[in-house]
Image (cartoon, rainbow, N blue to C red):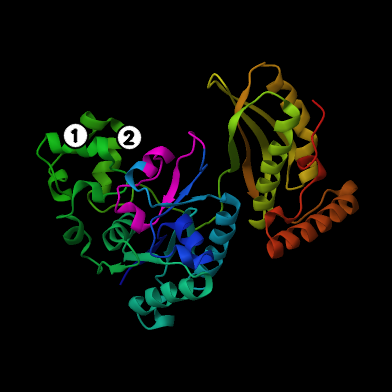
Amino acid sequence: MGTRILHVDMDAFFASIEQAEHPEYRGKPLVVVTKIDNPRGVVSSASYEARKYGITAGMPVGEVRRKCPGAVLVAGNYEKYVYVSEKVVDILHRFSPQVMVASIDESFLDITNCISLFGSEDNLALELKNTLWNKVNLPCTVGIASNYIVSKIAVKQAKPDGYLSVPPGKDLDFITPLPVRSVPGIGPRAEQVFHSLGVYTIGQIRKFSLEKLEELFGRAYGFHVYQWTRGLDVEYLPHTDLPRVISREITFDSDLVYWREIIPKIIKLLEACTYELRQKQMEAKRFTLKVRYADFITRTFSCSFPEPTLLDSDFLLALPPLIAKAKSRRYRVRLVGVMLSELTSLQGQLLLFHSLKEWKIKQGLKCIDKLRERYGFSFIHWASALETSKD
């Protein structure tokens, strides 16, 4: 049969999580926004009932209220969504040992050697959908094909809460008549270019040579379009769900001037990052603080550690010099963010002369993480994240 790739995409993920927690929201136009009563608030996720009114991600809250006065608006909780996403990924590993997490709500599974365990790929897909519904009460759409790009196109055709399998050897037959926007990566601008040339289907795009596509869209993107429209992955995607970076950021309701108000928020973001770092059994060697000022100038301030670490204490010790650099630009602050990078898998070996100290710290962090797993991330914080710091 050859390789079979299953793509699972959680339907209206953030909105569905809120509907799972609040059954009274089911069937209603539910919109998850960054901020409800603030002109900076935008849509993070919209239920399919809300999408019927033309509500899409990134839309300002004011426009949502105009398009759908009866919409139910809920302030998003990204920490909660990450937690649920991790539970979803844990469930996916029951169906294949090879899981690649593409985003917070999308994953790919190589099910080539797992189909026989379920009798057929249809049974596997149905069991996966039912398990996600029974365990986390969330709907999803599943697509199966011979590679990543075609399985993702299949999901787009089966949305929402659907399932579509493209038989082996039928990839081109499947994608040829589909509209150009059916290809992930072809957005409204590229679609407009194709329409201006009288091109409306994927099959019509294949009539273009590689040179012509590169002329229209540039060398890199033109090559991608050439491959995608032939049902070919651009490059091999490794079977891993390990991220390249872990980051969090927050935009304030109003620009802040006092760093004693800003620093606790940075520490909370850092805590969220290090918690995810440990959950994924990883360490980071580089730590970056991101600051966007009131004049929309964005600066980043970074440091690297001699060895990769997962300890909160290491990052907290590295934070003050970065903040000092950020404070030197005397503007109000609009946004702050934290990023951990140069990630490596946890090796489990401690430094020779600090093994006992590190072991004790890690045991303490394990206890903190278990409390968060049971009671939620916000159950426990470092004191510096709760109390105002000296300016």
Q: Which amino acid does label 1 sit on?
A: Val
Q: Position of residue 17 (x, y in %)?
A: 50, 61
Say left or right for 342 vs 114: right
Report which residue position mark 2 lands on. 220
Whether residue 244 is visible here, answered yes or no, is yes
**Magenta segment includes 241:** no
Say left or right for 57 vs 196: right
* Residue stretch rendered in magenta on the structure: 38-65
Report which residue position mark 1 lands on. 193
Say left or right for 50 vs 273: left
Nearest the viewer among 234 and 130 is 130
Position of the N terminus by quadrant: bottom left
Q: Position of residue 324 (x, y in %)?
A: 75, 23
Q: What element carries label 1?
A: helix
Q: Where is residue 205 in the image (x, y as percent from the top left)?
A: 16, 44
Nearest the viewer among 77 and 95 is 77
Q: Which amino acid does label 2 sit on?
A: Ala
Q: Say which label, 2 or 1, has the lower sequence index.
A: 1
Location of residue 288 with respect to 93 vertically, above or below: above
Q: Distance between the residues labelled 2 and 1?
A: 17 Å
Q: State the residue at coordinates (34%, 48%).
A: 68
Q: State the residue at coordinates (30%, 57%).
A: 156
**Magenta segment includes 61:** yes
Position of the C terminus by quadrant: top right
Toward which corner of the image does residue 150 lie, by quadrant?
bottom left
